[in-house]
Each structure stands twice: as C-alpha cells, then as structure tokens.
Amino acid sequence: MKIAYVTPLHFSSEEDGSYIGGGERYPLNLARGVAADGTCTVELISYGAAPARRDLAPGVTLRVLPGTQPSHPLDVTSWELVDALRDADLVHVHQVFTKGGEIAVLVARQLHKPICVTDHGGGTTRRLESSGALALADAIVAYSDFGASLVRATIPTHVIKGGVDAEFFTPPDAAGDRDRVVFVGRWLPHKGIEALIDALPAGQPLTVCGQPYSDDYTSRLRAQVQQRGLEAQVEFVSDRDDAGLRELYRRAFAVVLPSVYEDAYGNTYLAPELMGFSLLEGMACAAPAVCSRVGAMPEFVRHGETGFVFDSPDELHDVLQHLARAPDLVTRVGNAGRAAAAGDFDLRIAGARMRALYDDLVAARRAA
Amino acid sequence: MRILVVSNLYPPDVMGGYEMGCQQVADALIAGGHEVEVLTSTGSHHVEAQAHVHRDLHLTEIYDAERMAASSPITRLLCEADSYFVNAGNVATLTSVVERFDPEVVYFWNLIGVGGLGIVGAVHHLGLPWVWHLMDAVPGYLCSFRGQPVGAVVKEFERQLRGRFLACSQRVVDEIAVNGVTLPGPVELVPNWVRGPFPPLRTQWYDGGHLRIVSAGQVGEHKGSHILVDAAAELRRRGHTDFSIDLYGRVQDAKFQARVNRLGLRDVVRLQGFRPVSELVERYADHDVFAFPTWSREPNAFAPIEAGVAGCVPLISADCGNAEWLVDGVHCIKAERSASAFADALERIIKGDVALAPIGRRLRVLLRSFALEAVLPRIEEALQAERVRSEAGRRGARGTVQDVHLMAGLAETLIHLGIEERYAGV
C-alpha cells in the first residue's frame, strides 16, 4: 500500500528552510510509524523552490514539488499535485485548514482516493468546515481529544495520540545530573516563555531552545532576562539538532511548555497546543513534563504521575522549586513519563493505529 | 435511451448553427423514440415551458462584448473562469437533473459560458458515459485562460476524462490540438446536416448574364465579408459589372459599410440584414453562387450546404471546415482566401469557364447523405456505443452527487481566490 502525506511544510534540515515545529515533525514521525512494519510506504509530499525526492527513513520518502508562491506560506500548492497523488492508495492531508489543504482534498477526491485529514493548528482558512466540504474526506485524524473537539464535521473523527520517537529519545544510560529547566519550541508569544522566565526558581538554569520566529518577541524575552539579571541562568540556543535536543532533555529536571490562550500582546489563541510534542520528547527521555492547563497538553501529562499541570505562574514556580530540590521525585516522575511515552505515544504505536485506520478506509473504498 | 443534452444556449436563444443544430438533433432523437431532456441556460427570451427543456443554467456574460468591455479587469477574469472552468450553481443544477432523470448517456454541445469544464468533470466523476458534439473548438477554450492553454488543466483533461467525440470537421479537431489538447476518446467526423424535404431541383442554372451572389452569416472579417467586397471591386476593375452580392446577417464590423461606399459598390453589395434560416433557405433559390470566403477556423458552417440544397453553388475558402466535405469542381468551387482568388473564381463563372449546373446537381446528390435522417443514425450509434463501453468498463470508483456538489463549490471558490490574489493589481 502506498500512502501519500500532503503537508505544506516539511520537517527537514534547516538548509531546506522548511523546519518549523511539531506540526511538521508529526507527519514525518507518523509516516515512519506507519511504514515501520515494512508493508507499506509513505511519500511525504511537500513544496519547495525546486523539485526533489529523497529517502527520509525506511519506507518513507520526501517528494518536493515546485510550489506556488502564495501570500501565506501555508497556502502553497503545486500544479504537479495531481501527478503526485495519482498512484497513492490513500491520501492524508496534513494542515488541512489551508488553501493547499483544500486543493489537496479536492484533487484526492477527484481521483477517488480515500482521504484522511489532520489539522495542526495555525491554519489560514476554515472554509472546508464552514462550507461542509470537509465531508469530501473520509476521516478526520486528530492527535488529541482537544484537537478533535475543535473540528466541526459530519465525518468520523479518530483520535490517535502520540508520535514521538521513543527509540531515539531515551533516558541517559546512567543517571546523570538533571540540572536545568528546559523549554523546546518555537519562540512565539503563544508559547508563554516569559511566564516561564518569571517563574524560574532562584539559581536554577533554564535553556530556551528553538527558533526565533518573532524578532519582537525574542527581543522582549532577552530584555526580560537582562532586566531581571538572569543572564547567567537563562540561555537561548538555536543550533541543536535532534541529538543535541536529546542531550538537553536528558539534563532536564523539568521540560516545560507554558503555552497560553492569551499572549503578552493581548492576542488570543483558540488552539495554542494540539499536543505539545516537546513534552513527549522530554518524557521519552525521562524528564518530568510540566505544562500549563492549555489546549491538549493535560491529556498527555498525568498530574503528579508523569508530570505536572499548572494553572498559574505561582504554581509553575512551586512545581519547579519542588522538582529542583527533589531528585527522587524527578526520577520517579521521569520514569513514569518514559513508560507512558514508550508505551502509549511512541510513533510505532501511533503508526500501527493509523495504519489500521488506513486499511479500513482503503478496504471500504474498494468495496464501494 | 435516456439522453441528457447539455448546451449553453438553446433556441430561441442562439449564437449560430451550433445551438440550432443541437435542437434539431434533440428533436430528431425524440422523434426517434428516445427519452431526451435538455439542460440549458435561462437565456434572454421568455419561452413557453417545454417539459423536456430545463432552462436552469446560468450563462455568464462572456458573450456580451459591451458588458465585458465595461467590466473591471478582475471581473472579466472571474467571468472567464466561471465561463470556462466551473460554475458551482450550474453543477448543482446538473446533478439534480441527473438524480431525477438518471440518464444513460449525457450528450454535450457547446459548454462555453456555463462552466463547461466543471460540467464535464461532474459527469465524469459520477461515472456517466458522455458524448460531446463539437462544432467549435470548445474543449480548447475550456482548458484555456486569458487566451492561453493552461498546461496542468490540459494534462488532466486528457488524462482523467474519457468519452466520445463527434466533430463536424477535422478542422475543429486540429484547432483543438493547436491549443495543445488531444481529445480523450474516439473522435468521429460527422458532417453538419440539412433538414426537411429537399425542394425540387432547380431547372434554371446560371448561363451567363447577371450573376447573383449571396452570402450569409455574421458580416465581419472572420467570415471574410471584406474579402468578398474587395473581390467585387476587383471584378469591377476587370470590367465585370453584371453581378450583385446580397449579404445576409448582422454587421459585426462598423467599417464595413464605409468600405463598401469607399469602393463605390453600394449598388452591387447589398446588406440585407438578419433573416431567419427558414427565410434564407427560400432566398437561396434566387441566387447562383453562395460565396463564403470564411476564415480557416470555420468549423463547418450550415449555410453553404443549405444553399446547396437550393441549387446555389458554394464558392468557399479552400481551407475551411466545409471544404473537407466537398470536392473542388465536383461539389463546390474552392478558392484561396483572398480577394483576387475569389475574383478569379467568380470571373471564371461569369466567363462560362466553370459551369454551375453540373456542380449544383452533384452537390444535391451528395447532400442526400448529409440529410439529418442520414446523419442521425451515426449520432445514435455513438451515443449507444459510449453507453455500452462505459457500462462494460464501469468497475472503477464512482463519485456521489454530494461529492460533486461539494467539489464544485470548493473548486469555484479556490479559482476565484486564486485569480483575486494573482491578478489583484491588474
């Protein structure tokens, strides 16, 4: 079976200029999980300046189509999409609430393909939903109950949680020093990083790892650190590859995702986090996950067991203070998190569930 | 067979022979015992309700030159897209007719102005067999935008669609190919036809004296009206004065009458205005030659063969669609599309070098095979063959009416948004 994943941006090396965040990491990881048993292949179809094709993982290839140049990068598509989807047995459209997603759904239905769609948040249009055209798809796949609750549709919705690579993101061989708080994610206002800086216990280091996507917000964070005299405590890093990330998680006594519904500028977000990928990666490395009670994150963090869910900056401060002083707690919660990540949220587990859904949809289409 | 005919216009709303031909065939199919329904546009005339004709499609204003000229560029582009690509409302109308009528085959005619590509795509998606009667390069237009073929659209038109085509000439097929479109399915050439009982063969043929020339159709450059006027002037220069030219049809070119006056031909070239076909057919009997210096893109006009039935010998451009069906010197006279060549041909007739009587008689015999009752069985065979072929091959997935409805709406919106974004500053 050949599965086509259509995604406007692909998670790749920075040289490609297409690495973004969890919304892009997720299709790749899911593809790896789906193809893991060797009985099907997944082609990740995305867009770029020039056509390209290369292997990403066993059974997973990336096909870059020459893209259009829309005013919003998520609205990219390609005249060659029909060709690219023609041989697929099933099409999974990621980031479906974009113009490119709409076109992919249209093309796939025109070709009589079974269609799955997934919203990764941050889309550019909900027209598919408002027009009822989402019914052109056969199934919605959400990776959290929260995500599923946001989509209004008449077609079945399946929640398949997880997609972290728990074979790559693993705890350190020996219990090492977990000496810092870690944030991993895009430096954007809805991530609430400033609240984390404010809540940081005295003397505890914080590593803020990711890419700056807003110059103003990045400057604001740096100024905040400077004003509070935390230059020695807080470091901003943007150059970590996956191995570097893993090392960071392995040194964390808390991996924090303090996302907000209303950011420091007064902007509001309906779905700031549909999963919280870095929490799962941290958990896989046996780092306690700490998250705000926002979006889907509480679905993945069992409070007091695999991590902590906070409702206020004071609570965040208290949790971090507690963890900094209780290495046994860090070990216990971290191990429970690791078990959850490997047992429930690993990409192979999510991939197998996804594959079962694909099989059903393909069989139903053939029967029709 | 249950046959759904789809045409942008339908009498009394007509642009030319294409729509009239559609009605003639539809009526003949009904008379032949088929169950026929026609889906066409609302048109501009009030028409008494006909049970089998559904005037529910929306026709864009693309044929209204004045309206288009007065529109903003972006409006023109959106109108063009609605006209050629997809009109979601029309697709919805089509699907409701399909649901109710359940046709065994869909018979397309001119689909410009109603979102023709969407109509064909919808029928294809529903897995219905279809036959497309071409009297113009319609598929080529439908795959184009701003006068240029859209490569990706052409490619998918060729690859995804599968039907059967009846073309009135190879010229039409070639012109579609010039637009880069290869028709996706068997193509059969079926001539345009003549209807009704043939009048008695004329007994008086031109034998010197006053040569009565007639032409009919739109009076404009593409039909070669200016060539005919210049040919008349050339004949006069050569000393021939005993001839007249009656031109029937709407004048499309404002400079035309001025040209006639400037050349001093007011008494020779007579603009007779628009006349219904039934009247024209009678008037042809009063003329010797039907002069038709039309452009090479002429698919296969009805007028020359209707004139031929009346014994009026066609003098036609050698490379137009009509020329494919007639042999020079046997059924017609052919000339290069130039004033001098047409003047030469007319001069040969005036001098008696070419006798019209044998040509006219042979043409009458040939036209028996162009009678609608002779052509109709070929059309029926094509419809039946496509129905059977499609039935036999119907193993692939068939889309639902609901899907088609949603897809058309989404496609129309995406096309509009794309045009608005791409041409915002135009």
Image (cartoon, coloured by chain):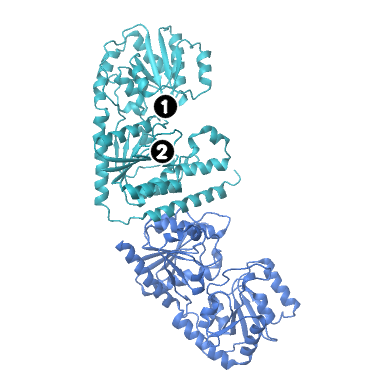
Chain colours: A blue, B cyan
Q: Position of residue A63 (x, y in %)?
A: 45, 61
The Cα–Cα distance between marks 2 and 1, rounded to whole angstroms, is 24 Å
Tell me the residue that label 1 is attached to.
B295
User: Relative to A362, is A339 on the left or the right?
Assistant: right
Q: Position of residue B55 (x, y in %)?
A: 40, 39
Query: Where B102 falls versus A277 (above or below)?
Result: above
User: Relative to A303, is B100 on the left or the right?
Assistant: left
Q: Chain of mark 1?
A: B
**Crowding at label 1, few (<14), some or many (≥20) Cα neighbours within 10 Å?**
some
Q: Chain of mark 2?
A: B
User: Relative to A174, is B185 on the left or the right?
Assistant: left
Quadrant of the image occupied by residue B105: top left
Q: Position of residue B35 (x, y in %)?
A: 28, 41
User: Relative to B322, is A271 on the left or the right?
Assistant: right
**Crowding at label 2, few (<14), some or many (≥20) Cα neighbours within 10 Å?**
many
Mark sitting on residue B8: 2
Quadrant of the image occupied by residue B241: top left
Q: Nearer the N terminus, badge 2 or badge 1?
A: 2
Cβ–Cβ below 8 Å for labels 2 and 1?
no
Given this view, does label 2 or label 1 mark the residue nearer the observer? 2
Residue A216 visible, this angle: yes
Residue A187 visible, this angle: no
The amino acid type of the residue labelled 2 equals Asn
Q: Are marks 2 and 1 on the same chain?
A: yes
> Residue lying furthest front in this view?
B48
